[in-house]
Amino acid sequence: MHIEVRNVNKAFGTHQAVRDVSFTIERGKLIGLLGPSGGGKSTLLRILAGLETPDSGDIFINGQRVNDVKPQLRGIGFVFQNYALFKHMNVFDNIAFGLTIRKARKAEIKERVNELLELTGLRGFEHRYPHQLSGGQRQRVAFARALAPKPELLLLDEPFAAIDAKVRKELRTWLKSLIAELGITSIFVTHDQDEAVEVADEMLIVQQGRLEQQGSPIHIYTDPRTAFVAGFIGHSSVVEQPNSLRGFENAASLAGAKAIIRPEFVEVGRQEEIAFPSAAEKGKVRHVFFRGAHLELDVEIGANRVSAHRSLDQVPLQPGEEVSVLIHRLYVISDESATMVENPLKVDPLPVHI
Amino acid sequence: MAGVVTTQLSEKTARPKHINESLAVRIILISVSLLFLGCVVLLPLLSIFIEAFKKGADVYFAAIRDPDALSALKLTLLTALIAVPLNTVFGVAAAWAISKFRFRGKNVLITLIDLPFAVSPVIAGLVFILLFGAQGFLGPWLDNHNIQIMFALPGIVLATTFVTFPFVARELIPLMQAQGVQEEEAAASLGAKGWQIFWRVTLPNIKWGLLYGVILCNARAMGEFGAVSVVSGHIRGETNTLPLHIEILYNEYSFSASFAVASLLVMLAVVTLIVKSFIEWKTARQLPKEES
Amino acid sequence: MTSSARKKAKPRSVLPGFGLSLGFTVFYLSIIVIIPLIGIFVKTSGLTPGQFWDTVTNARVLASYKISFLTSFYAALVNLVFGLIIAWVLVRYKFPGKRLVDSLIDMPFALPTAVAGIALTAIYAPNGWVGKLLEPLGIKVAFTPLGITLALIFIGLPFVVRTVQPVLQDLDNEVEEAAVMLGAFRWRTFRRVVLPELIPPLLTGFALAFARGIGEYGSVVFISGNMPMKTEIAPLLIMTKLEQFDYRGATAIAMVMLIVSFLLLLLINYLQWRSNRRVAAA
């Protein structure tokens, strides 16, 4: 196991930033540390780097306990949220900094920096100063600077937060392929789930200092283990009285519980469009939002409201229109856990008997 | 050269150790700072009071109640009372023009306003001698009309005004530039007229900065020595300000009396710094409120 | 074309009072500052270049310039070092009495210079508190160039501290942490990352303290002893010439000092403009 974190706790005054977090990471993985702002993700990252000292718990790198190893000596590269470039140094000197500190030979420094300039597409910018670069270029410099001393582990704190939406997408793909190519174990913090899902091999969901779930994006999306994860990942509606929804009237686990329904679990349309009419019930379209690639419908079913998607190719529905609604499945959530329940009425309307 | 920089001391928690010095280094640096300030600032301040009371409280109060000292005090107050309001009105007008409008030559204007900071006080006095003195450009004309400017109150006021010229403007210009014009434009769009905009919108926003500039301007006006020394003529009981009176007493070896009068000006400085700290405390308290 | 140029110069603002405020500003600036200063140039032009040259290269005048510039330079240098340390301590450390120390920094701005002058003389004279201790060591402060330097250190103290303080305050911890993560320990982080950021305010503070020093009069006259060729500063020589009604001589000396001061003012404005631009852009 490359990185191992065991029962780490950290408090700032009365605020418990990290609560008993444990996890392991395999070599070469790209990990997304995802959660809402102020949830303790950055603190966790800084503890790994040695920039914060945990109140209790242990951190192992390559099986060696590094709690007492100074951050300068941990061999970790760190990319800061606002890049923290050295303003008075040009791009070359910024990238070379870690090597000059290690007293590397001049020729060696030059070779390594040139290699990184090539890799990050910054060739030709080596004599520019940070204030003469765009946001995306600064990010690349910060990245190259962290990589220059060949760290064991690369940590990135909200690496895309300060970049325009358009460039951000481009940089994400670039970073993912680059890290895959270098094979360096990396952890990045983000509060943007699209980013985490798109970039990470594996995600760690952190909330209020607790590690909620660890797993691949698909695994976490399809099988959320906790109420928080079920609600946080994907767009979803919370339903207060799932017992009143057709198909779920008798589900014992639903008594008194709430449920989370994702738009893709909901089929909305004129009666003839629904594949399993017997499992559907009547609803009313309240609002229709244009979302670019599809329409988002806000549908009222009795006392419940759910959100659903509809393709632009289909017959448009109007607000106020009566529609059929089929709920394929939902997540029942109790205090801590989340369990998926399929709609039991969803049986083939025309079974073929041979 | 602006002597006016607002500071706010951070009350953050201790810095993490990897970006802080070791305890020994911290203690050494703090000790060096305190020792330096002790020798250069604190010791001289203490010495003034000790020297002033060396010959007893009677000598101290006699020196302060001396008619010459009282007339010097009066002249000092009168000078400040004229020079400070003049420079305050100027400072507000200049800051208004510079911060609320765009025009060519603005940077030149700001540099010119700074000019008196760069001029030695002695030269500041000299320029008025050259203008109004007996051999000056206007000297003969003034003489014919029996107008006394040099070696009289008008000269002292002029020299003081010159020396304290930039204080209020220098404090207000950056403050009002940072505040921009949005609030004033909003007021104008709601139908407020010129002076209404100024009194209701601008003044409440700049009042602490203005007060800050005024007290620093006042401290310098009451304490100015070089420029006033050139134009006053040192006539006892007539054209002596407090700093000049201190010099005369000192040169006559009446040290205790000299330090007694000096202690009055130390108190002025202390009050100035207390007001300054109060303003800083007040504005620091306002800031987080506005942010939330 | 002229109409478009005029249009550009006109402020397009809904706010009133442009004419009044700018008019008053320019008028007041002219009568208090500009016109009186022009007087010096006019008076100097009354001298032939030869007379002017003879006046300002007179041995006593040259000695006074040398004393003024050297003592101001050394004082600014001392303030550069201690100003940095004090600013550092005030921004970064916690210790009892910190607020009081911070207020004390402004004392030289608030205290009349003559008062500072007699107080420093009282302490550092051979029979003063500190002077007494230094006398046996062979160090004389009052009535020597060292005394002048000391007075100028007092006068210039706030400049470096107050220019460095805000920059240090705004310095992002992350920049230092970036250096840490790249393997730099404390001294290297300071030398390679923090100090370069502080160079512009240090230079500005140094220039401000230096400029203030060469013009200073009140605090220096008491402690300097005013011996021609040895401890006579340039502003004092102007004073002496005036007392002898040698207006032309006084004006010529003043002229040279004014030019130096203006150059310093331009340098300071340039330094501030440059660092502002970099901060604004980055």
Image (spheres, rainbow, N blue to C red):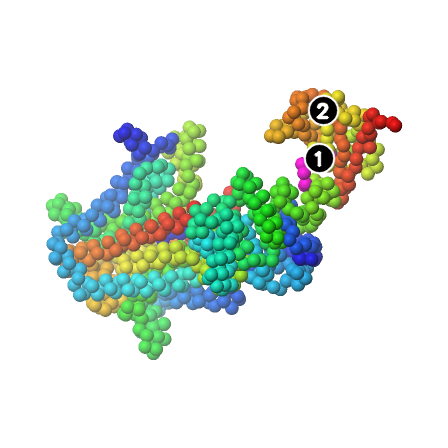
Q: How many marks?
A: 2
Q: How crowded is mark 1: few (under 14 residues within 10 Å), some or many (20 or more)?
A: many
- Write the start and end of the magenta stretch as one range: A232-239
Q: Give the residue displayed 56% in from the left and 61% down from the top.
A: A72
Q: In this view, does C217 lie above or below A194?
A: below
Q: Is residue B194 visible?
A: no
Indicate the position of residue B19 as horizontal and vertical percent values.
53, 60
**Residue picked out by circle 1:** A262
Both on one chain, marks 2 and 1?
yes
Residue B273 versus residue C261: which sits nearer the camera?
Answer: C261
Residue A154 versus residue A247: which sits nearer the camera?
Answer: A154
CA–CA distance between discs 2 and 1? 17 Å
Indicate the position of residue C200 as horizontal and vertical percent values.
39, 55
Indicate the position of residue C44 as horizontal and vertical percent values.
16, 52
The verdict on residue C203 being magenta is no
Q: Give the residue displayed 30% in from the left and 47% down from the top.
A: B111
Amino acid under label 1? Arg
On the picture, is A101 further left or further right than A197? left
Q: Give the residue displayed 53% in from the left and 41% down from the top.
A: A167
Q: Mark 2 lies on which chain?
A: A
Q: In this view, does A173 lie above or below C251?
A: above
Q: In this view, does C47 lie above or below B43?
A: above
**Residue picked out by circle 2:** A269
Could you say which disc has been placed on residue C231 in the image?
A: none
On the picture, is B185 further left or further right than B66? right
For the view shown, which residue lies furthest in the bottom direction?
C136
Q: What element carries label 2?
A: strand
Amino acid under label 2? Gly
Residue A307 versus residue B61: which sits nearer the camera?
Answer: A307
